[in-house]
Amino acid sequence: MATENPVESLQEEATCPICLEYFKAPVILDCGHNFCRLCVTQCWQGSNANFSCPQCREILQHRNFRPNRQLANVAKGAEGERVCETHGEALKLFCEEDQTPICLVCDRSKEHRAHAVVPIEEAAQEYKVGQHHVVEKLQEIQMMDTQRSWEHLRQKIMSEFEQLHQFLREQERLLLARLAELDQEIVKLQDENVTKLSKEISHLSEQISELEGKCRQPASEFLQVRDIISPPQIPTQGGKVSHFSQTTLALLLSPVSVTLDPDTAHPRLLLSVDRKILTWDVIRLNCPEHPQRFDLSPCVLGCEGFTSGRHCWEVEVGDGTAWAVGVATESVKRKEELSAAPEVGIWAVQRWGFQFRALTSPPTPLSLSCVPSRIQVSLDCEQGQVAFFSADSEDPIFTFPSTSFMGERLRPFFWVWGIGSQLTLYS
């Protein structure tokens, strides 16, 4: 096996693969390949993204390169005038047939006498022109790759927006269908009420005739007439319309992925690693003192805060019998026993044993058709409204009267008590 020439190896290491000359201000890419700074900059000219290595074609995330000072020293050492290894003369000619530099003595030798020979500078110039064409071709390929990437991104954006439009069209269809059903039900009930009212009018006509007859009777008999008129009762549809409106507005809310803030958690509350599960513990944890921590009430706040917009999040309450979920102001008291109500900056609903109630002042009992396992908390900062829905059936649970939050930051609020009580936040 032939031994590798160390001089040729050094010269090869010091040669830029783009311009085929010794490195000038060499830089190294993230993939490990080296180029002249000017050469690689020209290759990337006109590209704003998806920069690729001119040698291995690896896609680079950023237009990053670092100066290679060690290689610069090697190139500087190899840049000295090259000499013929056989005759020790300067390599000033280039044999086109053997594709190798030769000296003047080699040109007169038998080996190269009949070969076409040109000055080495002229041969180098021809190679530079060829490399320039290669660089242009690489730039064209890179431009095509960039255009394909932009086209792929454009198609992806169009696809995602089409899915969003499809979702909105489906929601529009469902809401219009619900509205049509409600309209039919209202018309039906109106017809029933008209029929009932007609009967009442007929009954009243009979009573009027009877009264007119009694008015013609003597005074002693007239005073014995009793009040026989009872006003007709006409049901309203306000409740159902309100239910429909609340359900519709719930679709306009922005879902929020809420996480629990450990700095506010009462020492008896355990938080999961992902800060999505809240559990009450009989053992009081040795928590560090913190000005934001609830010291007396087993409460914790969410990390997220809101001052504008419409937002909602879901909480799984499970089978626990002592919990409360809702919204609290940033300034809610932390170092004293809480009596939750809007007056102290808390809007929440609570389960206490078998009773459900809204934490108003005094508490408002809630009559629920079924016990919810998941509750949606809805916050409308613009309208000053906090509402609660059953996430299972979408039925409204309670809506607090509109108020002004005075621009104060609002945070998710949670309260649990007793063994077995646990709250889980949905992403």
Image (tube, rainbow, N blue to C red):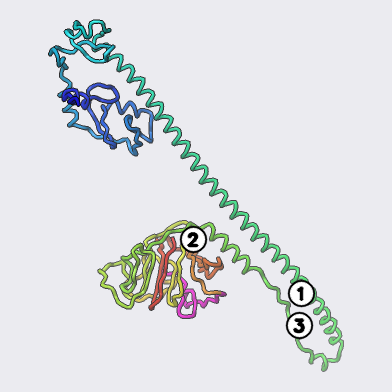
Which residue has dot 1 on it?
Answer: 196
Residue in the foreground of this view, choosing between 378 and 316: 316
Residue in the foreground of this view, choosing between 39 and 114: 114
Residue in the foreground of this view, choosing between 419 and 70: 70
Comparing labels 2 and 3, the label whose residue is closer to the camera:
2
Q: Does the magenta portion include 368?
A: yes
Q: Quadrant of residue 124?
A: top left
- Compared with 376, 295 (above or below) is below
Q: Which residue corresponds to the image point at 35% horizontal and 23% vertical from the top-left?
A: 135
Q: Quadrant of the N terminus?
A: top left
Cα separation, mark 2 vs mark 1, equals 41 Å
Which residue has dot 3 on it?
Answer: 229
Q: Which residue corresponds to the image point at 33% horizontal and 78% vertical from the top-left?
A: 282
Cα separation, mark 2 vs mark 3, equals 47 Å
Q: In the rendered structure, which segment of residues is drawn in magenta?
A: 344-369
Which residue has dot 2 on it?
Answer: 380
Q: Can residue 274 be seen in this snapshot?
A: yes
Looking at the rendered structure, the kind of residue marked 1 is Lys
Name the secondary structure under disc 2: strand
- Compared with 326, 27 (above or below) is above
